[in-house]
Amino acid sequence: MQFAIPIITMIYGIFLALQPRRAIDMQISLNRYINWHMEPVSMKREIIKTHITGAIVALCGFLSLMLIILQIP
């Protein structure tokens, strides 16, 4: 069970890093579902930021997994 959160975090981060436009479109469609209108001011900047955020999240998940495997507190 302790491996689940880092693995899910890595999968989510990889998805954000590799598919930033799809992740943004999913967020926009979820907001439309609850009757909110959301649109980035600059889609190019939003894609770049989502890509970077995804890489950081994936790295954090990987480091967490390594700490669990190596049992470093």
Image: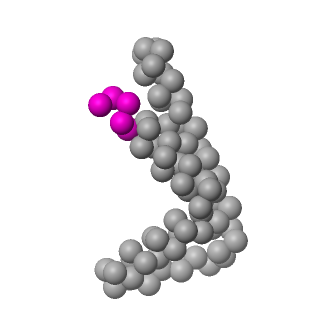
Q: Quadrant of the C terminus?
A: top left
Q: Is residue 53 something one can see in this rendering?
A: no
Nearest the camera: 40 or 27? 27
User: Looking at the picture, how far across and down is residue 67, in whole percent?
Assistant: 48, 21
Quarter of the rendering containing residue 56: top right
The answer to whether 44 is drawn above or below residue 12 in the figure is below
Q: Is residue 60 something one can see in this rendering?
A: yes
User: Looking at the picture, how far across and down is residue 36, in whole percent?
Assistant: 38, 82
Q: Quadrant of the N terminus?
A: top left
How many labels were placed on the picture?
A: 0
Name the residue rendered at 68%, 68% in the picture.
Answer: 45
Q: Is residue 51 left or right of residue 24?
A: right
The answer to whether 8 is drawn above or below residue 73 in the figure is below
Quarter of the rendering containing residue 21: bottom right
Nearest the camera: 19 or 34? 19
Q: Read off the magenta span.
A: 1-5
Nearest the camera: 37 or 19? 19
Query: Which scheme is used to colour this image of the protein?
Result: one colour
User: Looking at the picture, how far across and down is residue 4, in whole percent?
Assistant: 36, 36
Name the residue rendered at 53%, 80% in the picture.
Answer: 39
Name the residue rendered at 38%, 74% in the picture.
Answer: 30
Q: Is residue 22 magenta?
A: no
User: Looking at the picture, how far across and down is residue 43, in whole percent?
Assistant: 65, 74
Name the residue rendered at 48%, 50% in the picture.
Answer: 12
Q: Is residue 34 left or right of residue 52?
A: left
Q: Main secondary structure of the magenta part?
A: loop
